Image (cartoon, helix red, strand yellow):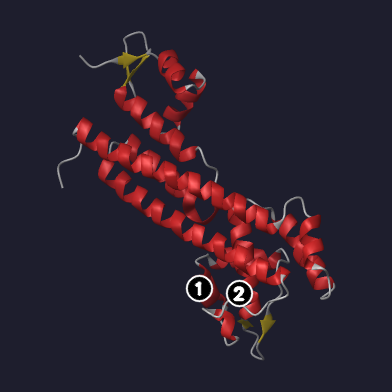
Amino acid sequence: MERTYTTSELAGIIGIHPNTVRLYEELHLITAPERKPNGYRIFTDLHLDQFINARLAFQVEILQNGLRRLAVDIVRATAECDFDKAIHLSQTYCRQIETETGHAEEAIGIVKDMLAGRDEGDGRDEGDGTLCLGRSETAAYLGITIDTLRNWELNGLLRIKRKKNGYRIYTDADIRRLKIIRSLRCANYSLTAILRMLTALSADPDTDIRAVIDAADETVITACDNLLSSLSRAAANADRIHHNLCRMKEKYHLNPPL
C-alpha cells in the first residue's frame, strides 16, 4: 500500500512550514494532491520526491542568464510528471552552469590583468585589437540579449563609440568590460555597485584600479570567486537532480519508455 502524508507530516519531513507546501501547490511546483472527503490533502512519495528536487533546484540563488528560469522549468516539468522533459532541461541546466563558470573564470583573469597593468586582453579572442562589432553581434558574442546590453548602456555602465552613420561599434576594450559586467550581474552584483567602479575609472584614467575596487563593498575578484562557489554548488545540486529524475522516471513509470 502506498504511503501517504498529511500537509504537516510532509512539511516536517522536508523541514518547511505547512504554508510553504500549500504555496508550492498553488505555484504548480508539485503535482496537485488528491483530497479526502473533508478536504484534507493527501500527499504521497511522489510529492516528497518532487519537493526534494525543488529544494535542490532553488537552494542556490543565481538569477542571471536564464539559470533561475531553467530551474523553475525543471521543477514544473517534474510537477507535471513529464520526466523526459525534466531530464532534458536538467542537462541544459548543467551545460549553462558550465558556461557561466567559464565566464566567471574569464572575468577574474581580465580583472587580474587590469590590476597588473595589463589591459590588452588574453590574445585568444578579442585580444588582437581588431574586434569591431555591432550591438546585435556583441549581444550574440557575449550570449546576452540586446535588451540586456541596452539596459547596461542606459544605466551608464559603458559608453559606446559610433560610426559616422550613427551605428554603435564595440571594441576590444568594450568587450572586456562587458565580460566583467556580465559575471558581476550573474553574481547578483548591483548595477549601482558596478557603476561606482566604472565611473571612477572613467572620471580619471589614472585612477588606482586596485584602490577603486577595494573601496567597494566587495572586490570584483571576490564577487566572481563567490559566483564560482555558487555555481559549483549549483552544479553539484544539478547532478543530484538529474540522478533523482532518472530514478523517479523508473520508479513511477509515468512516461513510456524511450
The three-letter amino acid code for the residue at tag 1 is Tyr
Residue 54 % position (x, y): 42, 35
Toward the viewer: 97 or 155? 97
Residue at position x 66%, y 71% in the image: 113
How packed mark 2 is, by other alpha carbons closer than 10 Å (few <14, some 14-19, many 20 or more), is many
| Type of the residue with mark 2 | Ile
Q: Is residue 197 left or right of residue 100?
A: right
Where disc 1 sits, the SS reads helix
Q: Which secondary structure lies at badge 2?
A: helix
Residue 78 vs residue 193: left or right?
A: left
Q: Mark 2 — residue?
A: 175
The location of residue 222, given as percent across then percent down, is 67, 53
Residue 211 falls left or right of residue 218: right
The residue furthest left is 257
Badge 2 or badge 1: first in the primary sequence:
1
What percent of the width, then of the height, locates residue 33?
A: 33, 23
Query: Which quadrant is the N terminus positioned in?
Result: top left
The image quarter in which residue 9 lies? top left
Residue at 31%, 9% in the rendered image: 37
Residue 63 appears in the rendering: no
Answer whether labels 2 and 1 touch (C-beta < 8 Å).
Answer: yes
Q: Which residue is mark 1?
A: 141
Residue 87 is at least partly visible in this image: yes
| Badge 1: residue crowd in 10 Å (few <14, some 14–19, many ≥20) | few
Q: Residue at x 55, y 52 (%)?
A: 228
